[in-house]
Amino acid sequence: MRGAQSAKWVALAAVVALAATACGGGDSDSGSNDMNKGSADPNGILTAQLSEPQNPLQPANAKESQGSRVLKQIFAGLVDYEPGTGKLVYVNAESVTPNKDSSVWTVKLKPGWKFHNGETVTAKSYVDSWNWSANVSNNQTNSSWFQDIKGYQDVHPDKGKPKADKMSGLKVVNDNEFKIELNSSVSYFAYKLGYDVWAPLPTGFFKDPKGFGEKPVGNGPYKFVSWDHKKLIKVRKFDGYQGPNKAKNGGIDFKNYTTADAAYSDIRSNNLDWIEQVPTTALTNYKSDLGKRAIDEEYSAVQSVVPAFYTKQFKNIDPKVIQGLSMAIDRDTITKTVLHGSRTPADSYVARGVIGYKAGALKEQVTYDPAKAKALIKEGGGVPGNKISIQFNADQDHKPWVDAVCNSIRKATGVDCVGDSKPDFQADLNARDKHQVKSMYRGGWVLDYPVNSNFMRDLYGSKAAGNTSGYANKEFDSLAAKADKAATLDETVKLYQEAEQVLAKDMPAIPLWFYKVNSGQSNKVLGKIPYGQDGDPIFTDVQVKKK
């Protein structure tokens, strides 16, 4: 039942696999390994690849895919999205209803839901959670997600201490109903409520938030068991879960891997049931290795290269320089060779499959043209130092495509370009958050909710949590605000398409290509693993074979 979800920065590499139509491969799925043979063990434990989450497991503190992947299993929110259509589906909410101008929303809960410790989930569980998470004193990485709510500035001022500990826009009506008053209209506000940040919290959280982050208590289909840092996180099925997505397995062991090759080796030997991404070294053989257990599906995410605008190099850069760097990248060749056809060159800041994606929104900005690239860089005053670096996490296979992009830029323009590796995704994210990126960083963005605003306002808005580059443009912020206040979702989407053209002029990032899931599963899994629009397995629907 779960569809598009909440991961933000994507850890995994863009380098993988063969095209869907290529290489039928062998048939390791035959005989005793037939994925559809056997019966399901409702208590069977699934093993899945994970990197170390950046932060403690608090709902508003995961702006990356690894922590979010675990949080999504432990917590259930108000709504979710139907895979493929983006249609809203109620989970803990019975209804989420706007007033006439979408400035006040009434939430009614399905009664009788429990946290894993037996505490009842109430309207107060949501309101207290949101007030705490928005408060600047609590330093939550995703606190800006609450900025639409009236009173946010009181708990999260730009400078200084908060004036209040509660947002005036949140009112508990009774145990199963609360109201949300916004600063102004937001036509798609209900869509945003599917993201992890909006999860409820039990009363025990507020006594020891830090300790809770090590041993979270949620209301979702799985309950937390243990976290052995950089090794293993265990969650198990919660028998008291009342949502529509009850677990069809007994639980998940999230195993930490420092390299994609090690994870791939384990899935081939059936010591791991799901791998996030096939490594570069398996590009030519993973389908023959895994047979029908190989996975090749597109999802809604985009890979980009992002200038760090707080650096001396890019602080006052002419956008022509960034556009020139973009036009120096031969996306077609890189996706066909280094990426073996497993990616699609990006033609928009918005990923395909998202409401408001407009094919060809970016034109010459993403068209390979060495002569014009060189001319634009010259017209823009050149790249300071005539050298750039691209930061990436080395625990996934980013190096091959970073090298290819650098080679393309170097060859087309004479601007030197090198990779700047960090040991893992956590170190990569920490450097971004602390504004320690030397030049540029790779950005992989997956949808939180299936509306184009999520790929613009939440990433390039001057106060957005996802904006770690320091980009700011008042015209873009103004257009985004206007789009949010539109009367209908259709109008909102069209106005964000206009805002995308502001980005096309500024080039706050260089879109490269759209992602696909190129993965695999072990022969211990019954049937094909289903995927959500965010590219993650729908873990609750995965069945483990009886031994």
Image: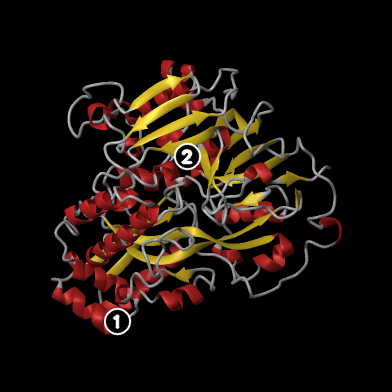
Visible in this render: residue 536?
yes
Element type at marker 2? Answer: loop
Q: Disc 1 vs disc 2: Cβ atoms closer than 8 Å?
A: no
Q: Residue 326, position in %: x, y?
A: 30, 71
The residue lying at 20 percent from left, 76 percent from top is 376
Report x, y in % for residue 400. Answer: 46, 66
494 horizontally vs 463: left or right: right
Relative to residue 291, is residue 270 depicted above or below? above
Q: Is residue 120 left or right of residue 291?
A: left
Q: Amino acid at mark 1?
A: Pro
Label for residue 166?
none
Q: Quadrant of the N terminus?
A: top right
| Mark 1 and mark 2: Cα distance apart in space | 40 Å
Location of residue 333 by image quarter: bottom left
Q: Identify residue type, mark 2.
A: Pro
Does residue 501 appear to the left or right of 210 in the view shown? left
Q: Which residue is mark 2?
A: 53
Question: What residue is at 19 percent from the left and 54 percent from the top?
Answer: 473
Question: Which residue position holds label 1?
Answer: 370
| Residue 21 quadrant | bottom right
